[in-house]
Image: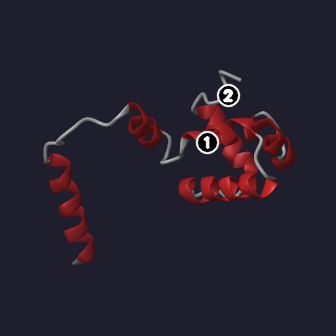
Amino acid sequence: DESLRDNFLQRATAMLPHSRPLSPKQAAKQAFGGLTAREREIAALIAHGKFNREIADVLVLSERTIETHVSNIMLKLNLTSRRQIASWAIERGLTANM
C-alpha cells in the first residue's frame, strides 16, 4: 500500500541523524508553514488591514508582486481568504513588531 510505504519512509527519515542543524532562516521558514521572510512580512501587513496597493507602497514593490506573494501564502498554508491570512499571522505573533 502506497500510504503505508510513505508513512514508513517519513518515519524512517525522521529517525536519521541530521548532518547539520537548520540555519536561523531555515528554522524560521519551517516554523511558519514554509513562508519566506517576505511572505511573513506581507501576512503581517494584511493582518494590520493593509490592501495590496498599500503593501506595495510600503515595501516598494509592484502591486502584482504583492498579489503573487498573497497567492503563494494561500497555497502554502491552504487558506482561501485574506481574513484567514490575518488570523494566521496574529495567532503566530507576526504582528507584534509592527
**Residue at the spot 21% in from the left edge and 38% down from the top edge:** 20
**Residue at the spot 79% in from the left edge and 42% down from the top edge:** 55
Q: Amino acid at mark 2?
A: Thr
Q: Quadrant of the C terminus?
A: top right
**Residue at the spot 57% in from the left edge and 58% down from the top edge:** 78
Left or right? Give the position of 64 relative to 25.
Answer: right
In which quarter of the view is residue 72 placed?
A: bottom right
Report x, y in % for residue 44. 68, 35
**Residue at the spot 54% in from the left edge and 56% down from the top edge:** 76
Q: Quadrant of the N terminus?
A: bottom left
CA distance for labels 2 and 1: 14 Å
Report x, y in % for residue 52. 81, 48
Q: Residue furthest front?
A: 60
Disc tally is 2
Q: Which residue is mark 2?
A: 95
> Is 42 or 76 nearer to us in this picture?
42
22 up-or-down from 3: above or below: above
Report x, y in % for residue 40. 60, 40
> Is 90 or 69 nearer to us in this picture?
69
Left or right? Give the position of 32 relative to 52.
Answer: left
Q: Amino acid at mark 1?
A: Arg
Circle 2 crowding by C-alpha within 10 Å: few under 14, some 14–19, many from 20: some
Q: Which residue is mark 1?
A: 38
